[in-house]
Image: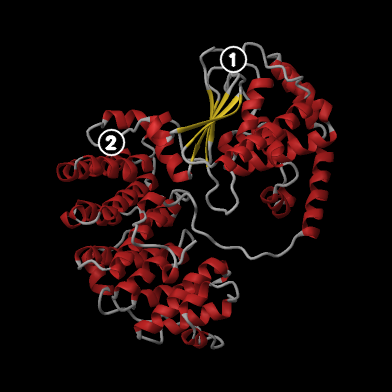
């Protein structure tokens, strides 16, 4: 699925537009009223978002060339993408929308809308439309970067770069798809390379190059693993840009490369040390200056938690420990030769900070929601650590996965003999299901939702016991949670016996117990059906916001003068 040349594409879509599709006649007129409203009202709680209005708005886009009307219509579609049933739009609706986008007047405000609409409405299910729209994105990237800077043009350029990044981030989850082939096309790389190498970019405000680095990093991550030469080409380009920038900006250039590119390809610590001329590793105390002791066995190293937040965190952890010991009858006695008598909880402000400094300071993988590193518990100098971040996407304070990861520490300290990989198999369901169950109890809405949707294809206990991390999120966490919950509620003594075998390093005994518990499968299947039935009876409709993936963008990349509010709203 090869794109045409950039020059030809610009000729086709830059000025002349293109012929309209033969699509159904206008639906019930509803968009006209939008043009009478204040666009800032579109994101208010009282606004209703129905498919008929969205379809008519898309239809209306084809019927007007007035920039103010187009601005309102496209801003309504942005609001609809968050609050409305975006999956309810038909193939014809999306074809018409793509056609309209290619026919927009080339003003900064409408170019901003073009980029946002591209990444909000088009995805792995619409590769043909994405391929059709990308040449126009390339065109406006060049145009916006070379025109005189203004607030309007900066918003348009920023959203254009975000469009590249978000599409590439999405393609990483669909690497064998036509969509991935489209967005990793060589012309996408050429457009991003030209932008980051441009003297205009390097002599302009730092946010341009920072966001260019990030988009390049997303491109590299989206490449097939079978293309190491292509990955190396991107790495070499980014490094060359950094070295040129270093001559102009000194240490600031190292910061841009490190946070814009290096940590976003998950380059980690060793590679940064090897590239110390362009990559910067800070001191731990610069990033995590604070230490708070909850108890002799638990302390929190953090960036910026308040005294109240520290109290909340300590209380959650210590109260949860009692539930763990009661469930597994540990007697609060550690396993033999375990010296992990104190847990360090390293807490960052948000995932962005965790992603950057978890790699640079602790050399851990950060493409996850937190990580527990048990280390070597037999070593008296070992320090068990949990790396976490504030649950930044909600108003109420919480450290994301704090309770879940603390259970891993308790499991390793009081149940499982030796280190993480001591036992050969059949421990993923135990570790992750137990952590989910003790952390969440019966309050696990996402898992129950999965159960109700897949009640006709539930796995057996034997299959769950054999779960591996490569089996995916549902098997690793959700089905494992259900197995642990069922056994804990109805066969607690069997669970305690299994724990005893692990504690005494008797793996054969543990496997025999799993084989015995696997015979409870018919009872487990009925229990899940009853649970799903009860959940459907209690289900209540609620307004859900279709937010941008919270791990897709980095807070430090956002230009200070460009805010996602007012007429530039995002969630």
Left or right of residue 494, residue 417 in this image: left
The residue nearer to you, when weighing 352 against 547, is 352
- Residue 527 drawn at (x, y percent): 82, 44
- Residue 104 drawn at (x, y percent): 34, 78
Q: Is residue 217 above or below residue 98?
A: above
* Residue receiving disc 2: 279
- Residue 125 drawn at (x, y percent): 49, 61
* Residue receiving disc 1: 339
The residue nearer to you, when weighing 26 against 275, is 275
Q: In the structure shown, which secondary structural element does the residue marked by tag 2 occupy?
A: loop
Density class for disc 1 (Cα within 10 Å; few <14, some 14-19, many ≥20) is some
Q: In the structure shown, which secondary structural element does the residue marked by tag 1 occupy?
A: loop
| Disc 1 + disc 2, Cβ < 8 Å | no
Question: How far apart are labels 1 and 2 at the CA level?
Answer: 36 Å
Which image quadrant for residue 194? bottom left
| Residue 562: numbered disc | none
In the rendered structure, which disc, 1 or 2, sits on the residue that comes first in sequence?
Answer: 2
How many numbered discs, if any? 2
- Which residue occupies 54% across, 12% down? 380
Task: State the quadrant of the N terminus.
Answer: bottom left
Q: Is residue 334 above or below residue 482?
A: above
Which image quadrant for residue 420? top right
Left or right of residue 408, residue 291 in this image: left
Question: Residue lying furthest front in this view?
Answer: 307
Left or right of residue 194, residue 350 in this image: right
Res 476 seen here: no
Res 529 seen here: yes
- Residue 12 drawn at (x, y percent): 26, 73
- Which residue occupies 74% across, 22% down? 499
């Amino acid at each position: 699925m090869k794109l045409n040349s950039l020059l030809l594409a610009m000729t086709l879509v830059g000025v002349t537009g293109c012929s309209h599709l033969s699509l159904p006649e206008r639906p019930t007129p509803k968009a006209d009223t939008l043009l009478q409203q204040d666009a800032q009202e579109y994101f208010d709680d009282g606004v209703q978002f129905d498919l008929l209005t969205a379809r008519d708005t898309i239809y209306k886009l084809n019927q007007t060339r007035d920039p103010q009307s187009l601005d309102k219509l496209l801003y309504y579609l942005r609001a609809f993408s968050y609050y409305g049933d975006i999956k309810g739009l038909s193939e014809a609706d999306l074809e018409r929308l793509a056609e309209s986008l290619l026919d927009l007047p080339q003003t900064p405000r409408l170019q901003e809308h073009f980029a946002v609409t591209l990444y909000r409405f088009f995805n792995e299910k619409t590769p043909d439309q994405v391929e059709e729209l990308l040449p126009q994105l390339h065109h406006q990237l060049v145009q916006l970067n070379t025109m005189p800077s203004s607030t309007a043009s900066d918003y348009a350029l920023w959203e254009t770069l975000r469009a590249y990044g978000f599409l590439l981030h999405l393609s990483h989850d669909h690497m064998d798809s036509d969509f991935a082939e489209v967005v990793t096309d060589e012309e996408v790389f050429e457009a991003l390379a030209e932008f980051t190498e441009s003297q205009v970019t390097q002599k302009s405000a730092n946010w341009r190059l920072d966001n260019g680095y990030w988009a390049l990093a997303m491109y590299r991550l989206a490449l097939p693993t079978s293309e190491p030469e292509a990955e190396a080409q991107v790495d070499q380009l980014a490094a060359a840009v950094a070295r040129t920038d270093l001559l102009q900006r000194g240490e600031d250039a190292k910061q841009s490369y490190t946070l814009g590119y290096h940590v976003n390809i998950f380059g980690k610590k060793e590679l940064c040390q090897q590239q110390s001329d362009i990559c910067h590793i800070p001191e731990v105390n610069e990033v995590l200056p604070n230490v708070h002791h909850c108890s002799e066995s638990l302390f929190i190293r953090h960036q910026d938690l308040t005294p109240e937040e520290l109290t909340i965190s300590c209380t959650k952890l210590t109260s949860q420990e009692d539930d763990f010991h009661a469930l597994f009858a540990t007697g609060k006695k550690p396993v033999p030769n375990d010296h992990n008598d104190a847990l360090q909880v390293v807490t960052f402000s948000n995932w962005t900070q965790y992603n950057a400094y978890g790699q640079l300071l602790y050399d851990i993988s950060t493409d996850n929601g937190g990580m527990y590193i048990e280390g070597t518990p037999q070593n008296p100098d070992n320090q068990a650590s949990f790396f976490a971040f504030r649950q930044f996407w909600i108003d109420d304070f919480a450290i994301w996965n704090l309770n879940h990861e603390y259970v891993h520490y308790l499991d390793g300290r009081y149940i499982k003999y030796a280190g993480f990989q001591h036992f050969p198999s059949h421990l993923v369901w135990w570790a992750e299901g137990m952590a989910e169950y003790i952390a969440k109890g019966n309050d696990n809405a996402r898992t129950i939702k999965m159960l109700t949707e897949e009640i006709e294809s539930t796995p057996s206990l034997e299959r769950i016991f054999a779960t591996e991390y490569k089996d995916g999120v549902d098997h690793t966490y959700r089905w494992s949670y259900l197995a642990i919950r069922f056994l804990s509620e109805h066969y607690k003594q069997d669970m305690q016996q299994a724990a005893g075998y692990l504690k005494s390093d008797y793996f054969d005994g543990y496997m025999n117990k799993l084989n015995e518990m696997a015979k409870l499968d018919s009872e487990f299947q009925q229990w899940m059906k009853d649970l799903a039935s009860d959940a459907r009876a209690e289900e209540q409709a609620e307004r859900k916001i279709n937010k941008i993936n919270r791990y897709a963008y980095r807070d430090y990349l956002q230009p200070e003068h460009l805010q996602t509010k007012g007429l530039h709203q995002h969630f």
